[in-house]
Image: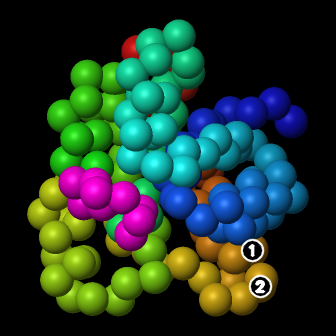
Amino acid sequence: MDTQILILLVDDEPPVIDMIQRIGRQHFSEAEFISASSPEAALTYLDDSSLPRPQLILLDIDLHAPIDGFDLLAQIQQHRYAIGIPVIMFTVSASEPDITRAYENGAVAYTRKPDSLADWVHYVQMLRDYWFRTAVLPRTGQP
């Protein structure tokens, strides 16, 4: 099946990126998961108007950079090529202040990173079931 949804994963951990992409190929073949391993890489991708615009962004909080996921979320919300793209926080934190801050800054969902392979599969299937089969997202393409 051809890719029908483009998801930008912003995470600084290569094993997480690999896990999502590998499980995505098996359980969410309608999606293409592209990755950015830093805030700068994410903004560079979004700045490039020749690249297809993602329809969904998965964003980690702790990016081991001067700009954390909250700061990047605020920048994405104001980015000329990213306005309207839903951002899901994707993190290990269960902190109530983090959850509140994410929603106050415009995240559409706050999700925890899975602990087991079965939970990773379930997470990717949940993304497919809601964001592909249920929700209607803007078409991908150039801004």
The quarter of the image holding the N terminus is: top right
Contact (CB < 8 A) between labels 2 and 1?
Answer: yes
User: In this picture, which residue range is highlighted in magenta?
Assistant: 62-71
The residue positioned 43% from the left and 57% from the top of the image is 59
Based on the displayed image, in which of its 4 quarters is residue 107 positioned?
bottom left
Find the distance from the CA under tag 2 to the CA under tag 1. 5 Å
Provide the major secondary structure of the magenta segment: loop
Q: Secondary structure at mark 1?
A: helix
Q: Residue at x 56, y 21 (%)?
A: 52
Q: Is residue 81 magenta?
A: no
* Placement of the C terminus among the 4 image quadrants: top left
Q: Which residue is mark 2?
A: 118
Residue 56 location, x and y as percent? 48, 44
Direction from residue 12 to residue 72 in the image, left or right: left
| Callout 2 amino acid | Ala
- Residue that badge 1 annotates: 121
* Percent position of residue 139, x then y: 51, 25
Decide whether residue 70 is among the magenta residues: yes
Q: Position of residue 103 (x, y in %)?
A: 20, 65
Label 2 residue SS: helix
Q: Amino acid at mark 1?
A: Val
